[in-house]
Image: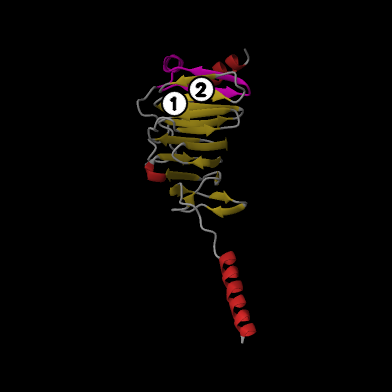
Amino acid sequence: MKVKHALILFSISLLTLLLVQCSPKKLAPADGIVTFKLGESNLVREGKTLPVELQTEIRAGDKIITAEKGVVIIVFRNNSAKIEIQPNTEYTLDKFDDQERLMTMTKGNAWLWSEKLQKGSKLQMRTPNTVAGVRGTKFFTFNMGEITGTCHCEGDVEFSNKSGNYSGVHHKHYMVFVKENKTVALTDKELVAMGFPIREEHQHSLLDDSPLGPHKEDMPPELMEKLMAHLTKEFDK
């Protein structure tokens, strides 16, 4: 009887252990949630690729990859930040807590808004050659071939390039462009002189009703030519 009793206890213990090991891994609370999607986009998490759907939960370590016509809006915990991730973009949420909110965009375009952060906290958007840090602002990060651009839409942005030869705090309406290890910053006065319309509310969305702001207007070809000519001249110095 003792042997039989021991075998029963052993079987119960083994079954309990197997159930614990086979039970689904408990996920940490979501850092953000997808509130809008257009077209196709994928979520890469722990080596697995899944389609992005409405109400998809986003956690630190997740990567969003949007297709040619894909747009995704993520609203972060407690409505503390929002981002519109535009087509052909690779975006990773590296970390999101009360002290640090770190994001990386390896290619593409994204429009980001953040609430005002408490002293000692930081939010950073990193690209292969830039770092934009904020305490409460809105800015648009974009790519034009080999050039990474940042439009400062609201508040102040602590901006630096990865080569370490440029850093500065820029204000609303500034635009900053980085190519390799060179940086060109344009003030609102310089942009006006080139013919850019300066609006109080910036327009960078691809949607008609984005929570980030108004739908963008295409830049006239002659204005784009003027901008590129100026940037080429500055980068060649």
Which residue is the site of mark 2? 176
What residue would you read off at disc 1? 152
Residue drawn at the location 38% of the way across and 32% of the way down:
116
Quadrant in the rendering for residue 80: top left
From what the image shows, is residue 8 above or below residue 193? below
Q: Which region is colored magenta?
A: 173-197
Give the Cα distance between marks 1 and 2: 8 Å
Which amino acid lies under the numbered mark 1 shown in the image of this protein? His
Residue 227 in view: yes
Frontmost residue, 58 versus 146: 58
The quarter of the rendered structure image containing the C terminus is top right
Question: Would residue 61 appear left or right of 199 to someone viewing this image?
Answer: right
Image: 175 above or below 45: above
Residue toward you, 40 or 113: 113
Say if residue 224 shows up in the picture: no
Quadrant of the image occupied by residue 21: bottom right
Q: Name the residue located 35 percent from the left edge and 25 percent from the top edge.
A: 200
Q: Secondary structure at mark 1?
A: strand
Which is more toward the observer, 210 or 218? 210
Identified at 54% across, 59% down, the residue is: 25
Q: Is residue 55 above or below residue 74?
A: below
Q: Please give the count of numbered marks on the rendered protein.
A: 2
Horizontal and vertical percent for residue 175? 48, 22
Give yes or no for residue 174 being in the magenta stretch: yes
